[in-house]
């Protein structure tokens, strides 16, 4: 009883001091909303792992800085734009959320992008791919953090065309993300002298790819580009192996592959795949230390680049808000974030451009052969570094109204 | 020729027809289980997709934890998952027989969500690897046919026909059908009707699990693999006629083929074509193509 009383008093004291420390923030609290897929095909690559990363960023930030009250909440958008929009509105209007982070699934991300702008809040996207977020749909309230379709296309497409893969057939997920990835990759292929001989758009999500693979086989294209993600990509790769696509002389290009996909496929099926990512857990000591903690809290899984990106984005956001001592004006916070160089233990030094694009190095990875792997989650060999300056679409080419 | 009119070379068309038939095999096997359960128990089993997923996971677990390969799983997984079905029927579904169909539907739907949630909690959503037991294939001239797909279509056809034969042509089947019509009378002849119904449910579930085992080497083994499929399979059952065994089998294969063709001519519509057909069939023949009007 006495203990309870003591705890209650201590708690009350903490609350009071917290309240005084950041009376500048709107409603006395910085509220971070992690909005992503908690139950569907992208739940492993974002999901609870991203929530953990956001909380970790808050924890690490508050180790070195006196923080006020910072709260992390999360919700499931089920990969549906209508559900994502409803949550975003509810969060901004009723629950006093200041910033929404993560949001994989491009169609949902584009919807949240508009809402954050209308309500003058902040949107830090790590999970979605469409390069339109910093192109024609760019917004003064949005930062696109980890990767985008242009960067994936540029990294993987270039590397493959250079090694002789100059005719392509696309298997494209039939929604905003697939279309953007296909468009950006096609541009890279054509620019480097290759050609696109055909494409087929499959429903999202799809289970059976045999019919589409047969069409790809008949096209005689050297490269079958998979402009999809998650279970769609793993299903397509698994079935391509079954139909002897690679033995037949054609190669697969996974345009968006996460480490969780490689884990789901197993090295035997995934070996030799080449793709572009922004981050890998086994690149350096800081990443490994982060991954170790992440694994302990997430059933031994390793973080994806999306989850690492959430950590990095939240860290930079907190720095900016802390310096401004206010989180009330979303556009002003994002402007502040753009004016400060970024630096954190996972992504190192970087910057954010006027169009909202976060700039850092990207990496070309190849999946190891089973005999090369030294243990669980030892999956990637680094083939090349794509320097930050070349990794993302030049600002002038994106048609972003903020740049003109 | 007609092929040129359609803008598709004949060889590609044959290939797509065959692939459609293979996918149809999955639809047939799954809708068969649903039709058996509905036809003989009047229960709309929404847990079917989850049980299909459990079949795939069971084969992965048998391999992972007990070293039992695919061929062993083909026998063991349906038995294990069928047994879980028996438990579910005894503990829960059997309490709802005196109520409207809707209650059974809601119960089994809720169960499916719980089961999928538990698997997701434990194994994540991105899936688990399961190796193909018969890799390789043969070139048929118009397409490359993986041995495994050939095996799936032949095996499913055999299972489907055997099930149809058992229910429509054997003495056991006649007891089952009689128990559906007049349970009191069949009971009076000294046949244990509740036990028969329990085993029927277990059998239907085992068919779903069998389809799951067949799917494991070609589809991603993940907790939501059944959720995506179950709606399509329900449409198949409705088109075939609720409860019609042969209807479920024929419609399963036929819709696989129609879906396959849609993937060539207008791939964007390939996940809706079955529902369009369902709507048309419901308007013209509400009892389904092979159902009898009540």
Image (spheres, rainbow, N blue to C red):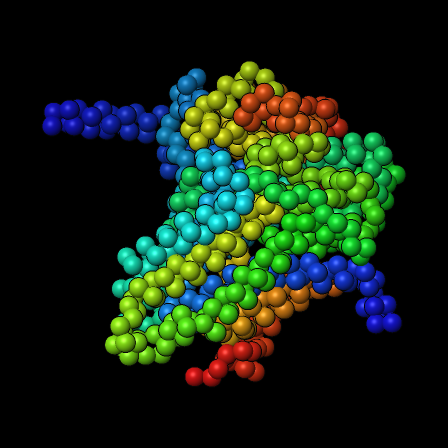
Look at 28% across and 25% down and name the residue there.
Answer: A14
Q: Residue furthest top?
A: A285
Residue at the far front in the pictured view: B171
Which residue lies at the image location 74% right of the left edge and 32% below the top edge?
Answer: A155
Query: Nearest the camera: B280 or A140?
Result: B280
Q: Viewed as shown, does residue B10 lie left or right of B275? A: right
Residue B54 percent across, percent down from the top left: 45, 49
Q: Quadrant of residue A287?
A: top right
Residue A303 in view in this figure: yes
Q: In the rendered view of the protein, which quadrant contains the N terminus of chain A?
A: top left
Residue drawn at 54 percent across, 61 percent down: B159
- Residue B145's place in the image compared with B38, above or below, is above
Is A171 left, or right, of B246 in this rendering?
right
Can I make out residue A150 in this image? Answer: no
On-image quarter of the C terminus of chain A: top right
Q: Where B20 falls versus B129 (above or below)?
A: below
Asked if residue A285 is positioned above or below residue A166 in the image, the reply reads above
**Within the image, what quadrant is residue A246 found in?**
top right
Q: Can you say whether B108 is above or below A222 in the image?
A: below
Front residue of A58/B139: it is B139
**Residue A263 x/y as whole percent:** 57, 34
Identify the residue at horizontal 49%, vertical 39% (top origin).
Answer: B68
Residue A214, x across and y down, in percent: 75, 53
- The number of callouts visible is 0
Image coordinates for residue A266, horizontal then vertical, percent: 59, 34
Which picture quadrant has residue A66? top left
């Amino acid at each position: 009883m006495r203990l309870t009383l003591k705890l209650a008093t201590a708690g009350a004291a903490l609350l009071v001091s917290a309240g005084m420390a950041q009376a500048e923030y709107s409603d006395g609290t910085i509220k971070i909303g992690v909005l992503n897929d908690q139950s569907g095909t992208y739940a492993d690559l974002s999901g609870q792992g991203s929530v953990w990363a956001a909380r970790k960023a808050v924890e690490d930030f508050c180790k070195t800085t006196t923080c006020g009250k910072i709260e992390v909440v999360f919700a499931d958008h089920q990969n549906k734009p209508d559900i994502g929009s409803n949550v975003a509105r509810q969060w901004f209007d009723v629950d006093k959320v200041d910033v929404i982070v993560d949001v994989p699934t491009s169609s949902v991300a584009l919807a949240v992008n508009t809402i954050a702008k209308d309500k003058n809040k902040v949107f830090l996207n790590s999970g979605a791919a469409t390069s339109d977020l910093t192109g024609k749909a760019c917004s003064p309230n949005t930062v696109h953090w980890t990767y985008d379709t242009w960067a994936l296309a540029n990294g993987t497409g270039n590397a493959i065309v250079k090694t002789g893969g100059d005719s392509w057939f696309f298997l494209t997920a039939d929604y905003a993300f697939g279309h953007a990835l296909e468009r950006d990759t096609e541009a890279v292929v054509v620019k480097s002298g290759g050609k696109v001989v055909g494409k087929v758009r499959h429903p999202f999500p799809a289970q059976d790819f045999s019919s589409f693979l047969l069409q790809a086989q008949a096209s005689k294209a050297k490269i079958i580009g998979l402009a999809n993600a998650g279970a769609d990509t793993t299903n397509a790769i698994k079935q391509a192996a079954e139909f002897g696509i690679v033995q037949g002389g054609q190669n697969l290009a996974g345009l968006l592959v996460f480490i969780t996909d490689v884990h789901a496929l197993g090295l035997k099926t995934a070996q030799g795949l080449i793709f572009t990512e922004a981050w890998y857990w086994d690149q350096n000591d800081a990443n490994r230390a982060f991954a170790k903690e992440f694994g302990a809290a997430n059933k031994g899984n390793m973080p994806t680049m999306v989850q690492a990106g959430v950590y990095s984005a939240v860290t930079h956001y907190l720095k900016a808000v802390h310096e401004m001592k206010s989180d009330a004006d979303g556009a002003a916070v994002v402007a502040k974030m753009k004016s400060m160089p970024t630096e954190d233990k996972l992504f190192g030094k970087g910057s954010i451009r006027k169009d909202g694009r976060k700039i850092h190095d990207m990496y070309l990875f190849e999946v190891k052969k089973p005999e090369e792997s030294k243990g669980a989650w030892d999956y990637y060999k680094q083939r090349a570094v794509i320097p930050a300056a070349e990794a993302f679409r030049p600002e002038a080419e994106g048609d972003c109204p903020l740049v003109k | 020729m007609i092929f040129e009119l359609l803008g598709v070379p004949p060889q590609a068309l044959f290939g797509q027809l065959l692939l459609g038939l293979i996918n149809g095999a999955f639809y047939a096997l799954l809708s068969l289980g649903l039709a058996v359960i509905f036809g003989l128990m009047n229960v709309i089993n929404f847990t079917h997709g989850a049980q299909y997923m459990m079949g795939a996971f069971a084969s992965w677990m048998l391999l992972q934890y007990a070293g039992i390969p695919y061929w062993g799983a083909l026998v063991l997984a349906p038995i294990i998952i069928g047994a879980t079905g028996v438990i579910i029927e005894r503990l829960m579904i059997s309490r709802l027989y005196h109520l409207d169909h809707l209650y059974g539907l809601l119960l089994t739907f809720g169960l499916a969500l719980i089961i999928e949630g538990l698997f997701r909690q434990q194994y994540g959503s991105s899936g688990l690897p399961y190796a193909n037991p018969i890799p390789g294939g043969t070139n048929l001239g118009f397409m490359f046919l993986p041995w495994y797909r050939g095996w799936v279509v032949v095996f499913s056809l055999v299972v489907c026909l055997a099930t149809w034969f058992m229910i429509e042509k054997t003495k056991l089947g006649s007891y089952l059908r009689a128990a559906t019509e007049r349970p009191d009378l069949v009971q009076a002849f000294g046949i244990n009707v509740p036990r028969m119904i329990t085993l029927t449910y277990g059998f239907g579930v085992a068919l779903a699990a069998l389809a799951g085992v067949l799917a494991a080497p070609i589809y991603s083994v993940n907790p939501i693999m059944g959720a995506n499929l179950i709606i399509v399979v329900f449409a198949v059952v409705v088109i075939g006629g609720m409860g019609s065994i042969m209807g479920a089998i024929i419609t399963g294969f036929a819709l696989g083929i129609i879906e396959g063709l849609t993937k060539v001519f207008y791939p964007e519509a390939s996940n809706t074509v079955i529902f369009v057909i369902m709507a048309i069939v419901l308007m013209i023949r509400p009892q389904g193509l092979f159902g009898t009007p009540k």
